[in-house]
Image: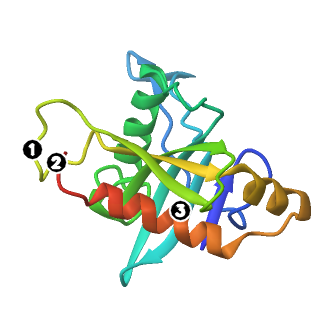
Amino acid sequence: MTVRGTQPVSLGPARKTQLPRGRYWKDGVSGPVGLTALPDLLVEDEWCGNQVLVVVDAKHYGESSWPATDSIVKQLIYRHLLSQRHQACNLPIDKIGNAFLMPVVLADASVRQRAIHDIDGANSSDSFGRIVCLDVDYRAVASSYVRRRANARLRELVVDSVMRGMNAPYR
């Protein structure tokens, strides 16, 4: 499994996948960069015998607060840009998961599903608006971070929880 992030993380080594950039064009001439897509973390792994990629936004959201529209839209765009539709990687969109990881202190587990974000009116075969929201035990993440060593069990639980959530029946 490989991971790409902007800072040291507890899920593994750097990933090489690059997301495409947006650029302004005028009269056929390339101008300044517009969109620069920099997800917090990309986790590549195997799940149920398939290669999968999980796009992670890891920020502090309190137990009663939720990611705002701008964070949701970024996650949806990252997933779309990483799909075969844009050739950023060679995976179909159904093999790319989306997740918000929220550090909390958990007494009985290291990962717990908090909720699944979906777009109203979506049908069961359309997971475009789906983002799995996971509580991740702060102590497990902090311990791994301090040791600068990946926590293989935590990574496995995150990938499994995200991909199960992405493939769960709609509501």
Pointer 1 local density, CA inside 10 Å: few below 14, some 14–19, many at least 20 = few
Which numbered tag is attached to residue 158?
A: 3
Q: Which amino acid does label 3 sit on?
A: Val
> Judging from the image, what secondary structure is the residue with disc 1 in?
loop
Badge 2 vs badge 1, beta-carbon distance below 8 Å: yes
Q: Earlier in the sequence, mark 3 or mark 1?
A: 1
Q: In this view, does 50 lie above or below 106?
A: below
**Residues at marks 2 and 1, CA–CA distance in whole angstroms:** 6 Å
Pointer 3 local density, CA inside 10 Å: few below 14, some 14–19, many at least 20 = many
Residue pictured at 56% horizontal, 32% vertical: 63
Residue pictured at 36% horizontal, 80% vertical: 48
* Residue furthest front in the image: 107
Q: Which of 122 and 75 is in front in this view?
A: 122
**Residues at marks 2 and 3, CA–CA distance in whole angstroms:** 22 Å
Q: What residue type is labelled 1?
A: Asn
Q: Nearer the viewer, mark 2 or mark 3?
A: 3
For residue 121, side relative to residue 80 (left or right): left
The image quadrant that residue 78 belongs to is top left
Q: What residue type is labelled 2?
A: Asp
For residue 115, side relative to residue 158 (left or right): left
Which numbered tag is attached to residue 123?
A: 1
> Judging from the image, what secondary structure is the residue with disc 3 in?
helix
Mark 2 lies on residue = 126
Badge 3 vs badge 1, beta-carbon distance below 8 Å: no
Q: Earlier in the sequence, mark 2 or mark 3?
A: 2
Pointer 2 local density, CA inside 10 Å: few below 14, some 14–19, many at least 20 = some
Residue 140 rendering spot, x and y as whole percentages: 74, 60
Q: Is residue 146 visible?
A: yes
